[in-house]
């Protein structure tokens, strides 16, 4: 039997799969009722998305305008039952435009799978989701 993956291994595998556009591979790492809350970010994909089907629709809307989208976990903080990450999004436009953004994400787990993901431009939102006042030591 394979060793159980750590929280950061699960998150990195999911982020890599999303960056590759391999959503089925990413969803192998989520519960069927996964909730993605990106109600605090700007963009037409903003909202609370419940279940894999809504998550896929959000991902498609998020990536459609771009030639390529690559996400990269650059920092991670163990918050007990959750994980907080700083993620860079690298976007390449169809007309050569390049953009890099940074978002904070708080990941919750159930049964070794991702069950809830909060995405925000503000660290404070990720801390509140993890019920923390400050980042734990890395």
Image: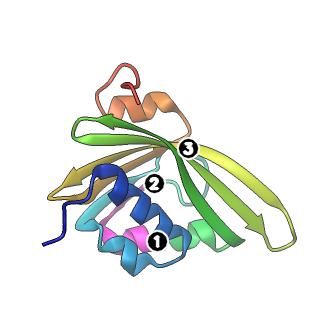
Judging from the image, what secondary structure is the residue with disc 2 in?
A: loop
Q: Which residue is mark 2?
A: 47
How is the rendered protein coloured? rainbow
Q: Which residue is mark 1?
A: 17
Q: Distance between the Cα atoms at labels 1 and 2?
A: 22 Å
* Residue 72 occupies quadrant: bottom right
Q: Residue furthest top?
A: 133
Disc number lying in front (1 or 3): 1
The percent coordinates of residue 27 (x first, y second) are 33, 72
Q: Is residue 42 left or right of residue 38?
A: right
On residue 41, the disc is none
Q: Distance between the Cα atoms at labels 3 and 2?
A: 15 Å
Nearest the viewer among 91 and 38 is 91
Q: State the residue at coordinates (84%, 62%).
A: 97
Question: Which range is magenta?
Answer: 48-57
Q: State the residue at coordinates (23%, 52%).
A: 109
Q: State the residue at coordinates (29%, 74%).
A: 28
Report crowding for label 2: few under 14, some 14 to 19, many 20 or more residues within 10 A (C-alpha). some
On residue 103, the disc is 3
Report crowding for label 3: few under 14, some 14 to 19, many 20 or more residues within 10 A (C-alpha). some
- Mark 3 or 2 closer to N-term? 2
Residue 76 against residue 52 in the figure, above or below: above
Residue 78 against residue 29 in the figure, above or below: above
Q: Is residue 55 left or right of residue 75?
A: left
């Amino acid at each position: 039997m394979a060793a159980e993956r750590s929280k950061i291994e699960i998150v990195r595998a999911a982020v890599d799969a999303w960056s590759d556009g391999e959503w089925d591979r990413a969803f192998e790492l989520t519960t069927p009722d996964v909730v993605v809350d990106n109600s605090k970010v700007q963009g037409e994909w903003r909202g609370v998305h419940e279940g894999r089907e809504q998550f896929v629709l959000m991902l498609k809307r998020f990536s459609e305008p771009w030639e390529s989208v690559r996400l990269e976990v650059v920092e991670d903080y163990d918050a007990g039952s959750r994980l907080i990450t700083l993620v860079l999004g690298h976007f390449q436009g169809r007309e050569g435009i390049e953009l890099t953004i940074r978002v904070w994400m708080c990941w919750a787990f159930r049964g070794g799978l991702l069950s809830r993901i909060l995405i925000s431009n503000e660290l404070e939102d990720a801390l509140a989701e993890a019920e923390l006042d400050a980042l734990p030591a890395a």
